[in-house]
Image (cartoon, rainbow, N blue to C red):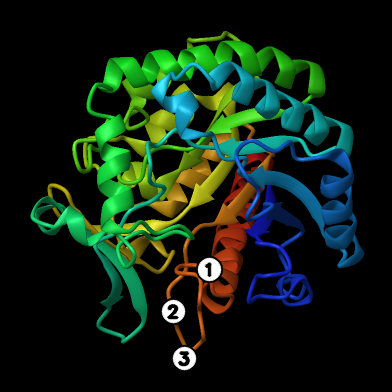
Amino acid sequence: MKMTMRWFGDGDSVPLEYIAQVPCVRGIVGTLEGMPDDQVWTVETLLAYKSKVEASGLSLDVIESIPVPEAIKLGLPERDYLIEIYCESVRNMGRAGIPVLCYNFMPILDWMRTDMNYILPDQSVVTGYSHGAMQIFDLSKGLETRVAWAKGYSGEELLAALKLYEAIDDNALFDNLAYFLRRVVPVAEEAGVLMAIHPDDPPWSIMGLPRIVRDAASIQRILDITDSRHNGLTFCSGSLGVWEQNDLCAMVRQFASRIHFVHLRNVRRIGKQDFYEVAHPSENGNVDMAAIIRMLIDIGYSGPIRPDHGRRIWNENVPRTGYGLYDRALGSMYLYGLWQGIEEERRTHEQK
């Protein structure tokens, strides 16, 4: 296992040297923000980014992510051209020696919340989601304050984007993902890059949009598209853990050979499709972190792990929701300590 932390480049409010001061963190999950969908991520740009990370004493282990253009998800005629651009970016990742690509196939939106300032009893601040609130939201107002991500949408932009997806259901979106993967995975194999799809967050339909990476059956269907280790999974305990029907440990076991990256985040379910995020320790939420780490050790997982979203604590200025330093540093140390403790427990047991 290699503990990593996400860094958004020079525009990140958290400097690399601060991340390097977290004792257990040895790697970076990086991205190139603001890159147009129709532009190749050049090897020169990737190497420059990598050099900056390595100068801080860390390694660049994952790119999260090269965005998949909407035209590919929609299956539009220009997708072939855009897929070739994507393939060249993957080749350049290989040339730069960056081994894992985390990506998602969520239409229009990345992770979605309805409450960006959910206050916990200890006065720390997290994000929350209420499906009822999402159902009655006036889409014409846009999602500038609802999207927990870098890009918001005005009402006009959102309605236009949703119009394009009216004819796309789960099966159509799956077919478009299959088309994409059958062309990209062979390139990833040649480049030595492990593709790792991220589950939908949350893993159910929002605004009528299809969601196809939500549970064991849907993930297995995706991994069966191409029987290649390079067609893999980012296992995210938070995204999958908000749905009670998902047995997280069983999923780790089922997808053992195809998990290339792990996001660990805890959530508290307060309804069938309602939840809020909490601090990483198991007792705070519905995700049993110790059980998941035991299972990751069982399957021999040795890849990158990162603490996912953190709370806003100690009055930290966190301009990017979920990505302050303080709580992610606490989460890193908690997860690392769990891992060390469970491994030591097993060594002691084996010696008896």
Task: Give the residue number, with chain letter if any, for mark 2.
Answer: 312
Q: Mark 2 touching mark 3, by CB under 8 A?
A: no
Q: Is residue 308 visible?
A: yes
User: Image point 64% across, 17% down: which residue?
Assistant: 185
- The amino acid type, in three-letter code, at marker 2 is Arg
Residue count near mark 3 (Cα–Cα under 10 Å), binned few <14, some 14–19, many ≥20: few
Q: Quadrant of residue 63?
A: top right
Q: Is residue 25 left or right of residue 195?
A: right
Q: Is residue 92 left or right of residue 340?
A: right
- Report the quarter where the C terminus lies: top right
Residue in front for this viewpoint, 338 or 214: 214
- The amino acid type, in three-letter code, at marker 3 is Asn
Task: Give the residue number, with chain letter if any, for mark 3.
Answer: 315
User: Image point 46% across, 52% down: which residue?
Assistant: 290
Find residue 323 and name its label: 1
| Mark 1 or mark 2: whose residue is earlier in sequence | 2
